[in-house]
Amino acid sequence: MKPTSPQISKHEVLDRYFLEHRAKLIDIAAFLDRLDRAEGAEDFRAAAFRDALAKLAGANRAREILTVLSDPSTEPIDQATTQGASGAHDLGDS
Amino acid sequence: MRYIDPHIHMVSRTTDDYERMSLAGCVAITEPAFWAGYDRSSPEGFRDYFRQLTDTEPKRAAKYGINHHAWICINPKEAEDPGFARDVLKLVPEFLDKPNVLGVGEIGLNKNTRNELAILEEQIAIAAAHETLILVHTPHLEDKLKGTRLIMDAVKANANINPGRVLIDHVEEHTVGEVLERGFWAGMTLYPETKCTPQRAADIIECFGSERLWVNSAGDWGPSDPLAVPKFQREMLGRGHNAGLIAKVTFDNPCAFLSMSGRFDAGDD
């Protein structure tokens, strides 16, 4: 089956999703304001977040943001130092 | 609308969840072996877990009219110690013969280490030797893109494995295209915070089509929703998609892939 567009209009997309994503947009703004007010130094996650935000201006935004937050290396690492993931790649580890 | 949840960890869920899933239209599930939120203290701990997957859960599900199936393996989070992992792998063939077991899974990578990769390759070889299907876990968050590519390379390196009998799970917008282009099946996991939301899964169907794609809840002990699949169905309906397309992604596609095991029962006779 071939890709298919939403069966609803742009106006209907806005009706269904605008308020939900308006709230998420303000959450992001408040998060960045909170980060500005906090004491101490930022780490790699803050820089990655700002790099990802810049992708909102382009196309294929979800794919591009996921990619900019990903480890760009290609070889397996020698040993795991943690079992978890932080959500952004530390370029200092590359 | 009936549906199959092809990836859910019912050992972490209550009986009430079975009842709610049944009321929402769930007729069959498959449950991969996974990390329990802590590392087991001995390989024998896995024997009890595999018994739970192949004996206890099928009975619990049957009370609500849901056909339960399982996948057996050592998960990638506990594969960093190769000696420990190989002791667990000695248990796997015995359980692959159980009547509700569809194959080896969910194998894959977690932090993309050399040890994880070695154990992954050994489990791919076990699947090839037993001619079973494979269900693949791809890493979380920043490790997913690299890990997905390493996993696909490892599967392709085994000449005895047909990618059309392998499902790569937890795909997102940056991995789904490559997975499908390389001939694998792809699963979208519907999570409230990580992986895909029902809305993004519907976006992916709209952008990539519905061939070799399914959705699952991967409900477990963390933030997750055992009713995520019917919520995806509702999202698709709300966008005006027809019932045939929704049934294809939430019933027909999982049925087609899982039936290649020769053991899957969707309960639709």
Image: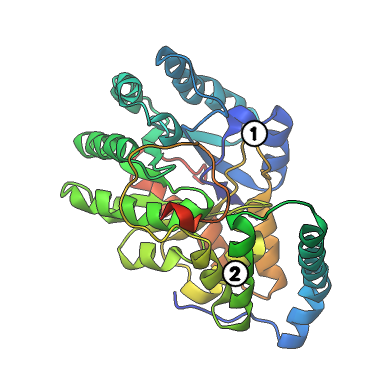
- Which residue is at the front of the view, B257 or B9? B9
Residue A52, labelled with which disc? 2
Residue lying at 77% horizontally and 87% vertically, measured from the top left? A11
> Measured from the top left, where is residue B102 in percent x and y?
38, 37
Which residue has dot 1 on it? Answer: B221
The quadrant of the rendering that contains the N terminus of chain B is bottom right
Question: Residue type at mark 1?
Answer: Trp
Chain containing the residue with disc 2: A
Give the Cα separation between the discs numbered 2 and 1. 30 Å
Pointer 1: residues within 10 angstroms few (<14), some, or many (20+)? few
Determine which quarter of the picture holds residue A58: bottom right
Going by the picture, which residue comes out furthest to the left?
Answer: B159
- Which residue is at the front of the view, B256 or B93? B93
> Measured from the top left, where is residue B26 in percent x and y?
62, 45
Asked if disc 2 and disc 1 are in contact, CB closer than 8 Å, the reply is no
Dot 2: what SS? Answer: helix
